[in-house]
Amino acid sequence: MNVTRGFTGRPRVHNPGLPPGQYDAGEDWPVLSAEVTPDLAPADWSFRIDGLVERPHTWDWDAAHTLPASAYDGDIHCVTGWSKFGVRFGGVSLDAFFTVVRPHVSATHVIAYSHTGYTTNLPFADLTGGRAWIVWEYDGKPLPSEHGGPARLVVPHLYFWKSAKWIAGLTLLDHDEPGFWEGNGYHERGNPWEEQRYSGD
Amino acid sequence: MPGRIEVSNQEAAVWQTATLTEIRRETPRAATFRLAVPRWAGHLPGQHLMLRLTAADGYTAQRHYSIASAPDDSGHIELTLDHVPDGEVSGWFHTVARLGDTVEVRGPLSGFFAWPGDRPALLIGAGSGVVPLMSMVRHHRLRGLAVPLRLLVSARSPEELIYASELGTETTPVFTRRAPQGMPVGRMAAAHVAPLLAERPAHGWEAYVCGSNAFAEHASRLLVAAGQPVDRIRIERFG
């Protein structure tokens, strides 16, 4: 252990919800996109699932809202170090979308892509079983554009760069391909509890 | 998205011990901390690192900081840190740190905001958002690069303009609260961006925007409105 002289840190209580190396951002919700926030109206938003599926499908705003509503109420963790507790997102579970497109058994990975061209890769298993959502509400209100509105992906058990803003679609693959940040040195999976921040972690 | 720049990720996985060798006051709120990192593998202007402090009970705090110095072979890197109110890490640097202290760093990290010096660079920053941009300006000078580079930087007042004595003819300062005699006070506006975009260097500008989220939103919208292609704007937001 490399102790820093004179450093004590903030007074703290043990928080079992805080992954290693993270701090509680409190009320803050930092914005960390590397690109210009797009002007994307709900009427211009669409979401497509293709690749290794039986029936590729595209939903527009109204069609996506006919799927059964589902909410996430819990914590999110950003690779830059902040975690935010008790976040409430409203939208639809990805399971509901997958029921429509019927993924092939050969699908092992997914590339998520946004309306701005951002990409991120995920193991397919991380998106099923009620652990991933397409969301359009934050705290009961429309999701702000700088946080990915009108709709974003939310995969809260992984670092938040995996939760692509302005989500446009998913392509199911039988292999892994790095996305935008993964090609810039970030970890392929990004599990906060194992501190999978950068490639090599 | 703008094109990627490939950088080595080998060194980014390793924590290294860095020794504080110099502290320079920049403004009432900001100071530069020079660190000896003997095994530093080099970086590109605009890249950042992760810094870790460890308390005696094993508690650690880690933060990302932009690198202020240009890549060189001095075995040193520099960080310029604002003293954030109640800042756990910046507070230690500003009130406890002294020469000879050691901290841990890993990096360099992320190639997205990096500028290797190959394309005309239009740099727009506010407050401590000027830090990674200054690495680019210093790189440009150190290497005597001929490729055009311009810096548009916003500060509340002349006293709060970081690196003021180093800024040259490539720089246009904008003051939002108080300006020197004869200069206007006000927010960065289309009139500041237009003359730079009018220069039209060969192959166009690569724009780099750094600052708070509110500033980044404002500046990137000014750029888009002035005709800068959206896929040639890179943004680093200080969360």
Image (spheres, coloured by chain):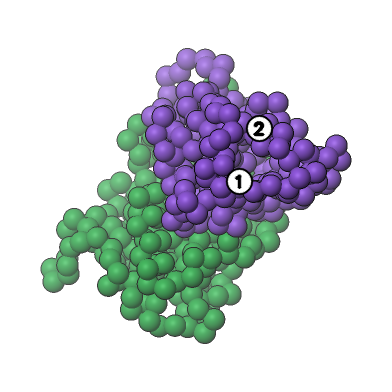
Chain colours: A purple, B green
Which mark is drawn over residue A96? 2
Number of marks present in the image shown: 2
Query: Label 1 sits on what residue type?
Result: Trp
Q: Is residue A3 visible?
A: no
Q: x, y (%) of residue A3?
A: 56, 28
Ranked by sequence position, the earlier of labels 1 and 2 is: 1
Q: Tell which subunit mark 2 falls on.
A: A
Question: Within 10 Å of the Cα at label 1, are there few (<14), some (14-19), or many (20+) other Cα atoms?
Answer: some
Q: Tell which subunit mark 1 falls on.
A: A
Query: Label 2 sits on what residue type?
Result: Ala
Element on which disc 1 rests: strand
Labels 1 and 2 positioned on one and the same chain = yes
User: In the displayed structure, would residue B148 be above or below residue B26?
Assistant: below
Task: Residue at 52% x, 15% y: name it.
Answer: A14
Task: Residue at 76% x, 45% y: name it.
Answer: A55
Element on which disc 2 rests: helix
Q: Residue lying furthest left in this view?
A: B181
- Check disc 1 and report the residue beneath it: A59
Which mark is drawn over residue A103? none
Q: x, y (%) of residue A118?
A: 60, 54
Task: Residue at 38% x, 55% y: name it.
Answer: B217
